[in-house]
Structures are given as structure tokens and as C-alpha cells.
């Protein structure tokens, strides 16, 4: 490994560390380091460094979250969640699974991982308190449901994952690989949550159904928002499904190419604004600019690493482990350790996905398998109190007693799930 490659790796680590320690967006540190390394060590003009900004990912994150913010701002998603929970109030043992599937559905409908956790954790923990459900089980229900649904490529996070896949040399297979990641993540999260349900005795839950009040009906504004969300799903997903069965039909192939999720989101956001389905200014402010800057800033520094052939060097180093299964476990565990302190879509996947092509050639492992286990490793530790998911859970606690109860348990689960992830690496190794 060259001195320049080492400097870039150290810069990545320092950017993440400083971001965690100072609470200043790590993407800003990454941009500053990109300027110093690119301009003064690699001889690249500042304008060329700026050109490394991942514009496509930036655009998708902005457009998709901006559109779905209307559904959050006017209460559509929260109303839907409350209706579902109310319907299942007479089946107390099913409530933890209801919370899981509510988080899953709301996440698929576009709210995305962070929004769902922020939206449902206060509600979920309140339900736990009323029904005497272990708050750790409630937190697991929201986190696992949200992360599984958030992998769908029509959501902000899922769309970014798909773009990262396309950007590392798998453009033609990007949708298929993204769908595979969604399916495997959903299966894994459901398995983990079921384990938590059994260990924490969710089946013994008893509640007073009268404590759950029937929500008010959807307002005309909220019904219109649901129609727009359904329109989004139809325009983006249906052509892709049809192409699977009718691959040679030109009009379907054209629709797949033209129904870009970013531009469809912008069009629907304009319609939502004209129909006054929410305050456009509030929706714009609610765009997760910190996340966008984190992903984009880290993307610039990672792009410099690519220019310095850091990707090829890391791939060769990991491949030197020899045994393909050992290589898989090492790379997936590395993803999990990184995710304890950083974002999956902002740091882990943009850092590790670029090495997949070289690692696949060197180890004989399929690219699909490597993508799945890197993603699985990363999300396995997303419940860490030091990560955004665990942090949102702790921030949703209504009292210090619940917060003190959850903190050490979330931390312990981080280590347990990282070990469980090794099992998934083995299982998927034989499947793929």
C-alpha cells in the first residue's frame, strides 16, 4: 500500500472520528481532506475535486425525501400507523409484530429508515409502556421493520444503495441486485426480530384494548397524498416487474429507462405543492441535508481513493486471506464494525462496494453475494447507541429510566448481532 493510499484511509477514519467526537458533519471533514489531498498531494485542481461530488446520489436523496416529506408533514403516515395499530388492539401477543410490519410498510411507502424510526419509536415505546411490553422488543420491532422496508429501491436509502451498485460497475444488474438486497435484508430482520420476540417473551403480552382510541378518518388532504404515493409506486415498480415477464417489449423497456425515481418524485412534489398537501417550505427544510452532505462529502474522498487505486489494493489485501468464506466473514465483519460509529449508506457501502469487482475476481465469490453480506454486516450493528438508529431510539425515550434500561442492552445487542451476522455469511455462502 502506497503512502498516498494510507493517507486517504487515515483521512476517512479521522473524518468519521471527528464527526462522532465533535458532532460536526463528517462529510464536511471529508470535503476538507479531499481538497488538501487532491490539490496538494495528487496535483488535482480544486474544480476537479468538486467534480467528484456524487451528483446522482445527491439528486435522488433530495428529490425522494422532499416528496415523501409531504406525507410526513400532513400526518398521512402517522395516521396510517395509528389505524393499523388500532385494528390489532385485540390481539396483544401480535402487537410487537404489528409494530414491526407497520414500520416495514411505512418505510416501503417512502418514509425511509430515519424518518420511520423518528416517527414510530415514540409511538412504539408508548405502546410498550401501556401494554407492559419490554421496551427493547419495541425498539427492535421499529428498527428491524424500518431497516428492512428502507432497503426497497423506491425509498431514499434503497435508491442510494441502487445507485452505489450502478456506480461501481454493475449498472445493468443494479435493480436486480438492489431487489436481492431488499429480500435478504427483510428475511434477516424478520429472523432477528423473531428471536428477540421469543427471548423477550412477546407472546405473553396483555393489554387493555380500551386504551387504544380509534383515529380520526383520513382527511381529503391525506387521501390525496396516499394516491400520490401509490402513483409513485406504480410508475417506478410496475414497469420493472413487467420487464421480468416481458423483456422484449420495447415500450416496457422504454418505461423502465424513463421512469426515473428522482424525476418522478420531483413531478409528484410539484403536484403536492399545487394541491396544497403540505407546506412546501417545511418539507424543504425537512430534507435530511445532514445525511446528504455526509454521503456526498464522504463520496468525494472515496472517489479520490479510487483515483489512487486504493480499491484495488484493499481488494488484494482481503483476498490474500485465501479461503473464500473467511474472506466473506472478514469483509462483512468489517462492515459491521464500521457501522457501529457511522452510516450504512453514507460511509460503509460507498467505502466497501467499490472493492467488490476486484474482490470477486480474486476470491471467486459472486458480486451479488458480496453485496448482500456487506449490507448485512453493516445493518447488523445499526442498533448501536453510537449510530443514528440507536441514537434515535434513545432520543425517543419518554423518561430517563427507559433510556438507562435500553442503552446497555442496545450496546450488548450490537455485539450479539455482529456474531449472528457470521452465521448469515455462512448460510448465504452455500445459497449463492
Image (cartoon, rainbow, N blue to C red):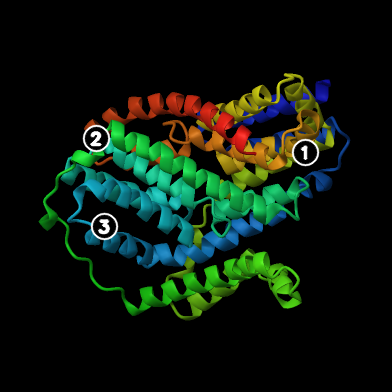
Q: Quadrant of residue 360?
A: top right
- Residue linked to disc 1: 357
Residue at (33, 64) in percent of width and height: 80
Farthest residue in the right direction? 43
Instruction: Pick whichever, 315 or 242, lies toward us.
Output: 242
Q: Does 199 sit above or below residue 205?
A: above
Spatial separation of the CA atoms under disc 1 and disc 2: 44 Å
- Closer to the eye: label 3 or 2: 2
Camera sees residue 368: yes
Spatial separation of the CA atoms under disc 1 and disc 3: 44 Å
- Closer to the eye: label 1 or 2: 2
Image quadrant containing the C terminus = top right
What percent of the width, then of the height, locates residue 131?
17, 45
Q: Secondary structure at mark 2?
A: loop
Spatial separation of the CA atoms under disc 3 and disc 2: 20 Å
Q: Does 53 sit above or below residue 399?
A: below
Mark 3 / mark 2, whichever is N-terminal: 3
For disc 2, the neighbor class at 10 Å (few under 14, some 14 to 19, many from 20) is some
Name the mark on residue 201: 2
- Residue linked to disc 3: 85
Image quadrant containing the N terminus = top right
Q: Secondary structure at mark 3?
A: helix
Q: Quadrant of residue 132?
A: top left
Instruction: Pick whichever, 109 or 98, lies toward us.
Output: 98
Residue at (52, 57) in percent of width and height: 287
Residue at (74, 75) in percent of width and height: 249
Q: Is residue 83 left or right of residue 185?
A: left
Q: Quadrant of residue 279?
A: bottom left
Amino acid at each position: 500500500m502506497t503512502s498516498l493510499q494510507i493517507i486517504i484511509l487515515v483521512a476517512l477514519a479521522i473524518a468519521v472520528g471527528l464527526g462522532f467526537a465533535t458532532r460536526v458533519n463528517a462529510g464536511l471533514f471529508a470535503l476538507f481532506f479531499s481538497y488538501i489531498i487532491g490539490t496538494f498531494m495528487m496535483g488535482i485542481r480544486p474544480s476537479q475535486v468538486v467534480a467528484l461530488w456524487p451528483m446522482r446520489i445527491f439528486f435522488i436523496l433530495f428529490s425522494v425525501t422532499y416528496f415523501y416529506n409531504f406525507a410526513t408533514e400532513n400526518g398521512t403516515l402517522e395516521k396510517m400507523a395509528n389505524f393499523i395499530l388500532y385494528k390489532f388492539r385485540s390481539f396483544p401477543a401480535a402487537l410487537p409484530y404489528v409494530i414491526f410490519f407497520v414500520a416495514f410498510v411505512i418505510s416501503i411507502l417512502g418514509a425511509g429508515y430515519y424518518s420511520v424510526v423518528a416517527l414510530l419509536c415514540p409511538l412504539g415505546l408508548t405502546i410498550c409502556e401501556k401494554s407492559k411490553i419490554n421496551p427493547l422488543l419495541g425498539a427492535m420491532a421499529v428498527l428491524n421493520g424500518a431497516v428492512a422496508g428502507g432497503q426497497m429501491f423506491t425509498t431514499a436509502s434503497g435508491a442510494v444503495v441502487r445507485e452505489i451498485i450502478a456506480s461501481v460497475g454493475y449498472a445493468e444488474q443494479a435493480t436486480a441486485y438492489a431487489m436481492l438486497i431488499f429480500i435478504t435484508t427483510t428475511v434477516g430482520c424478520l429472523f432477528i426480530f423473531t428471536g428477540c420476540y421469543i427471548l423477550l417473551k412477546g407472546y405473553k403480552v396483555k393489554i387493555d384494548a380500551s386504551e387504544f382510541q380509534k383515529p380520526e378518518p383520513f382527511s381529503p388532504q391525506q387521501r390525496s397524498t396516499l394516491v400520490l404515493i401509490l402513483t409513485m409506486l406504480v410508475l417506478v415498480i410496475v414497469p420493472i416487474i413487467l420487464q421480468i415477464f416481458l423483456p422484449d417489449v420495447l415500450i416496457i423497456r422504454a418505461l423502465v429507462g424513463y421512469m426515473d425515481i428522482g424525476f418522478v418524485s420531483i413531478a409528484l412534489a410539484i403536484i403536492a405543492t399545487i394541491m396544497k398537501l403540505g407546506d412546501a417550505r417545511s418539507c424543504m427544510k425537512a430534507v435530511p441535508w445532514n445525511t446528504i452532505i455526509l454521503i456526498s462529502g464522504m463520496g468525494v474522498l472515496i472517489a479520490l481513493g479510487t483515483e489512487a487505486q486504493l480499491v484495488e489494493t484493499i481488494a488484494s489485501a482481503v483476498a490474500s486471506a485465501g479461503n473464500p468464506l473467511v474472506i466473506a466473514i472478514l469483509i462483512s465483519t468489517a462492515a459491521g464494525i464500521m457501522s457501529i460509529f457511522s452510516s450504512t449508506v453514507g460511509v460503509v457501502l460507498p467505502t466497501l462496494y467499490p472493492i467488490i469487482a476486484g474482490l470477486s475476481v480474486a476470491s471467486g465469490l459472486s458480486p451479488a453475494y458480496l453485496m448482500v453480506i456487506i449490507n448485512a454486516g453493516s445493518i447488523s450493528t445499526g442498533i448501536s447507541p453510537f449510530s443514528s438508529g440507536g441514537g434515535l431510539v434513545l432520543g425517543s425515550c419518554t423518561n430517563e429510566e427507559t433510556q438507562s434500561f435500553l442503552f446497555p442492552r442496545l450496546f450488548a445487542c450490537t455485539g450479539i448481532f455482529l456474531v449472528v451476522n457470521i452465521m448469515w455469511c455462512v448460510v448465504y455462502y452455500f445459497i449463492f
